[in-house]
Amino acid sequence: VVTLTEPRVTVARTSKDVVRYSLFERIIHWVVGVTFVYLLLSGMALAYPRMAWLANGLGGGQTMRAAHPWVGVVFSAGLLVMVFMWAGAMRFEKSDREWVRRMREYTHTGHTGLDTGRYNAGQKGYYWVVLAFGAVLLITGIPLWFPWMAGAGVQQAARIIHNLAYLVMLAGFMIHVYMSTVMFPGTMSGMTSGKVSRRWASWHHPRWLREKDQ
Protein backbone atom coordinates (compact mmCIF):
# COMPACT_ATOMS: atom_id res chain seq x y z
CA VAL A 1 0.00 0.00 0.00
CA VAL A 2 1.42 3.37 -0.98
CA THR A 3 0.84 6.21 1.42
CA LEU A 4 0.07 9.40 -0.46
CA THR A 5 1.19 12.78 0.75
CA GLU A 6 -0.92 15.20 -1.29
CA PRO A 7 -1.08 17.83 1.49
CA ARG A 8 2.71 18.24 1.20
CA VAL A 9 2.60 18.58 -2.58
CA THR A 10 2.10 22.32 -2.73
CA VAL A 11 3.03 24.67 -5.53
CA ALA A 12 5.68 27.25 -4.70
CA ARG A 13 4.58 30.80 -5.45
CA THR A 14 8.04 32.31 -5.77
CA SER A 15 9.63 32.76 -9.19
CA LYS A 16 13.15 32.02 -7.91
CA ASP A 17 14.87 29.31 -9.95
CA VAL A 18 16.50 26.16 -8.63
CA VAL A 19 19.40 24.24 -10.20
CA ARG A 20 18.23 20.92 -11.64
CA TYR A 21 21.18 19.84 -13.82
CA SER A 22 24.88 20.61 -13.58
CA LEU A 23 26.88 21.80 -16.58
CA PHE A 24 28.44 18.35 -16.95
CA GLU A 25 25.03 16.65 -16.93
CA ARG A 26 23.79 19.03 -19.60
CA ILE A 27 26.85 18.52 -21.79
CA ILE A 28 26.44 14.73 -21.68
CA HIS A 29 22.71 15.02 -22.36
CA TRP A 30 23.29 17.21 -25.43
CA VAL A 31 26.14 15.05 -26.73
CA VAL A 32 23.81 12.05 -26.59
CA GLY A 33 20.92 14.06 -28.05
CA VAL A 34 22.83 15.61 -30.95
CA THR A 35 24.60 12.39 -31.89
CA PHE A 36 21.29 10.54 -31.78
CA VAL A 37 19.71 13.04 -34.16
CA TYR A 38 22.61 12.51 -36.57
CA LEU A 39 22.27 8.75 -36.25
CA LEU A 40 18.53 9.06 -36.69
CA LEU A 41 18.81 10.99 -39.95
CA SER A 42 21.78 9.13 -41.38
CA GLY A 43 20.28 5.79 -40.42
CA MET A 44 17.08 6.75 -42.18
CA ALA A 45 19.06 7.69 -45.30
CA LEU A 46 20.97 4.40 -45.19
CA ALA A 47 17.99 2.14 -44.50
CA TYR A 48 15.34 3.67 -46.73
CA PRO A 49 16.22 4.52 -50.37
CA ARG A 50 13.44 7.12 -50.55
CA MET A 51 15.16 9.03 -47.73
CA ALA A 52 18.60 9.00 -49.37
CA TRP A 53 18.27 12.71 -50.06
CA LEU A 54 19.00 13.32 -46.37
CA ALA A 55 22.64 12.50 -47.08
CA ASN A 56 22.99 15.85 -48.85
CA GLY A 57 22.76 17.66 -45.52
CA LEU A 58 24.95 15.16 -43.65
CA GLY A 59 28.19 15.50 -45.57
CA GLY A 60 27.28 13.46 -48.64
CA GLY A 61 26.63 9.77 -49.08
CA GLN A 62 30.16 8.40 -48.59
CA THR A 63 31.01 10.76 -45.74
CA MET A 64 27.73 10.00 -44.00
CA ARG A 65 28.21 6.25 -44.37
CA ALA A 66 31.71 6.48 -42.90
CA ALA A 67 30.67 8.85 -40.11
CA HIS A 68 27.58 6.93 -38.99
CA PRO A 69 29.37 4.20 -36.98
CA TRP A 70 31.86 6.64 -35.45
CA VAL A 71 29.05 8.92 -34.33
CA GLY A 72 27.46 5.76 -32.91
CA VAL A 73 30.59 5.22 -30.82
CA VAL A 74 30.30 8.73 -29.38
CA PHE A 75 26.59 8.16 -28.70
CA SER A 76 27.35 4.88 -26.92
CA ALA A 77 30.11 6.51 -24.86
CA GLY A 78 27.65 9.20 -23.78
CA LEU A 79 25.17 6.53 -22.69
CA LEU A 80 27.93 4.81 -20.71
CA VAL A 81 28.61 8.06 -18.86
CA MET A 82 24.88 8.32 -18.14
CA VAL A 83 25.02 4.91 -16.48
CA PHE A 84 27.48 6.17 -13.89
CA MET A 85 25.86 9.60 -13.68
CA TRP A 86 22.18 8.74 -13.18
CA ALA A 87 21.71 5.00 -12.58
CA GLY A 88 21.47 5.43 -8.82
CA ALA A 89 18.78 8.10 -9.08
CA MET A 90 16.88 6.02 -11.65
CA ARG A 91 16.26 3.03 -9.41
CA PHE A 92 12.57 2.25 -9.11
CA GLU A 93 10.83 2.74 -5.78
CA LYS A 94 7.59 1.30 -4.42
CA SER A 95 5.86 4.63 -4.97
CA ASP A 96 6.63 4.39 -8.71
CA ARG A 97 3.97 1.69 -9.01
CA GLU A 98 1.33 4.17 -7.95
CA TRP A 99 2.70 6.70 -10.45
CA VAL A 100 2.20 4.15 -13.23
CA ARG A 101 -1.41 3.63 -12.10
CA ARG A 102 -1.94 7.37 -12.36
CA MET A 103 -0.18 7.76 -15.71
CA ARG A 104 -3.38 8.83 -17.45
CA GLU A 105 -3.84 11.61 -14.93
CA TYR A 106 -0.23 12.66 -15.46
CA THR A 107 -0.58 12.88 -19.23
CA HIS A 108 -3.60 15.15 -18.80
CA THR A 109 -2.39 17.44 -16.00
CA GLY A 110 1.35 16.78 -15.56
CA HIS A 111 0.62 15.95 -11.95
CA THR A 112 -0.34 12.83 -10.01
CA GLY A 113 -0.65 14.14 -6.46
CA LEU A 114 2.29 11.98 -5.44
CA ASP A 115 5.35 13.18 -3.57
CA THR A 116 7.73 12.60 -6.48
CA GLY A 117 11.51 12.73 -6.15
CA ARG A 118 13.99 13.95 -8.73
CA TYR A 119 12.63 11.60 -11.41
CA ASN A 120 9.20 10.08 -11.85
CA ALA A 121 8.54 6.53 -13.00
CA GLY A 122 8.06 7.62 -16.61
CA GLN A 123 11.45 9.31 -16.72
CA LYS A 124 13.08 6.31 -15.10
CA GLY A 125 11.45 3.96 -17.57
CA TYR A 126 12.59 6.03 -20.53
CA TYR A 127 16.13 6.13 -19.16
CA TRP A 128 16.37 2.34 -18.91
CA VAL A 129 14.75 1.84 -22.31
CA VAL A 130 17.31 4.18 -23.90
CA LEU A 131 20.20 2.35 -22.24
CA ALA A 132 18.87 -1.07 -23.21
CA PHE A 133 18.11 -0.27 -26.82
CA GLY A 134 21.25 1.83 -27.11
CA ALA A 135 23.19 -1.31 -26.18
CA VAL A 136 21.24 -3.28 -28.79
CA LEU A 137 22.10 -0.70 -31.45
CA LEU A 138 25.78 -0.90 -30.51
CA ILE A 139 25.94 -4.71 -30.48
CA THR A 140 24.04 -5.13 -33.73
CA GLY A 141 25.96 -2.31 -35.36
CA ILE A 142 29.33 -3.99 -34.93
CA PRO A 143 28.80 -6.78 -37.53
CA LEU A 144 27.33 -4.19 -39.90
CA TRP A 145 30.42 -2.01 -39.47
CA PHE A 146 32.82 -4.95 -39.73
CA PRO A 147 31.07 -7.45 -42.03
CA TRP A 148 34.11 -9.75 -42.05
CA MET A 149 33.39 -10.57 -38.41
CA ALA A 150 30.17 -12.45 -39.13
CA GLY A 151 28.45 -14.47 -41.83
CA ALA A 152 25.65 -13.30 -44.05
CA GLY A 153 22.98 -14.78 -41.75
CA VAL A 154 24.28 -12.94 -38.70
CA GLN A 155 24.55 -9.71 -40.66
CA GLN A 156 20.97 -10.02 -41.88
CA ALA A 157 19.69 -10.69 -38.36
CA ALA A 158 21.77 -7.81 -37.01
CA ARG A 159 20.37 -5.47 -39.66
CA ILE A 160 16.75 -6.39 -38.82
CA ILE A 161 17.25 -6.05 -35.06
CA HIS A 162 19.20 -2.82 -35.57
CA ASN A 163 16.35 -1.31 -37.59
CA LEU A 164 13.71 -2.42 -35.07
CA ALA A 165 15.68 -0.97 -32.17
CA TYR A 166 16.07 2.23 -34.17
CA LEU A 167 12.29 2.51 -34.58
CA VAL A 168 11.75 2.04 -30.84
CA MET A 169 14.34 4.71 -30.08
CA LEU A 170 12.78 7.05 -32.63
CA ALA A 171 9.33 6.70 -31.05
CA GLY A 172 10.72 7.28 -27.57
CA PHE A 173 12.73 10.28 -28.72
CA MET A 174 9.69 11.93 -30.31
CA ILE A 175 7.64 11.47 -27.14
CA HIS A 176 10.53 12.74 -25.02
CA VAL A 177 10.93 15.93 -27.06
CA TYR A 178 7.18 16.57 -27.16
CA MET A 179 6.75 16.16 -23.41
CA SER A 180 9.81 18.31 -22.66
CA THR A 181 8.64 21.20 -24.81
CA VAL A 182 4.97 21.33 -25.75
CA MET A 183 3.31 19.15 -23.13
CA PHE A 184 5.09 20.43 -20.03
CA PRO A 185 6.45 23.96 -20.57
CA GLY A 186 9.37 24.87 -18.36
CA THR A 187 10.95 21.43 -18.54
CA MET A 188 13.44 22.23 -21.29
CA SER A 189 15.04 25.07 -19.31
CA GLY A 190 16.54 22.41 -17.05
CA MET A 191 18.67 21.23 -19.96
CA THR A 192 19.48 24.67 -21.35
CA SER A 193 20.16 26.98 -18.42
CA GLY A 194 20.34 24.11 -15.94
CA LYS A 195 17.60 25.70 -13.84
CA VAL A 196 13.85 25.32 -13.43
CA SER A 197 11.41 27.50 -11.57
CA ARG A 198 10.57 26.54 -8.02
CA ARG A 199 6.94 26.51 -9.05
CA TRP A 200 7.69 23.92 -11.74
CA ALA A 201 9.77 21.84 -9.31
CA SER A 202 7.16 21.87 -6.55
CA TRP A 203 4.47 20.80 -9.03
CA HIS A 204 6.38 18.00 -10.78
CA HIS A 205 9.02 16.91 -8.21
CA PRO A 206 8.05 18.20 -4.74
CA ARG A 207 10.14 15.75 -2.70
CA TRP A 208 13.23 16.55 -4.76
CA LEU A 209 12.72 20.27 -4.15
CA ARG A 210 12.38 19.77 -0.40
CA GLU A 211 15.52 17.67 -0.33
CA LYS A 212 17.46 20.40 -2.17
CA ASP A 213 16.22 23.00 0.32
CA GLN A 214 17.45 21.01 3.29
Image: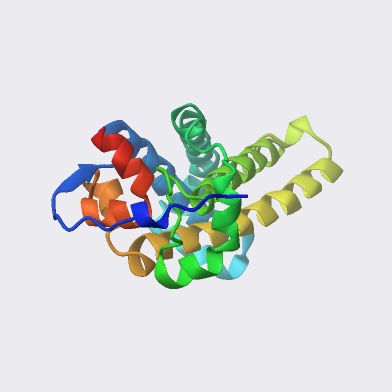
* Image: 169 above or below 148: below
Question: For this rendering, which residue is in front, 197 or 27?
Answer: 197
Residue 88 seen anywhere in this rendered image of the structure: yes
31 left or right, relative to 163: left
Question: For this rendering, which residue is in front, 138 or 60?
Answer: 138
Residue 45 seen anywhere in this rendered image of the structure: no
Q: Quadrant of the C terminus?
A: top left
Seen at 28% across and 48% down, the residue is 190
212 left or right, relative to 129: left
Labels in figure, total: 0
The image quarter containing residue 60 is: bottom left
109 left or right, relative to 126: left
Percent across and percent down for residue 22 are 28, 34
Percent across and percent down for residue 144 are 69, 41
Question: For this rendering, which residue is in front, 107 or 67?
Answer: 107
Seen at 73% across and 50% down, the residue is 161
Percent across and percent down for residue 208 are 35, 42
Question: For this rendering, which residue is in front, 34 or 41?
Answer: 34
Seen at 47% across and 65% down, the residue is 106
80 left or right, relative to 59: right
* Image: 4 above or below 18: below
Seen at 79% across and 49% down, the residue is 156
Percent across and percent down for residue 54 are 46, 63
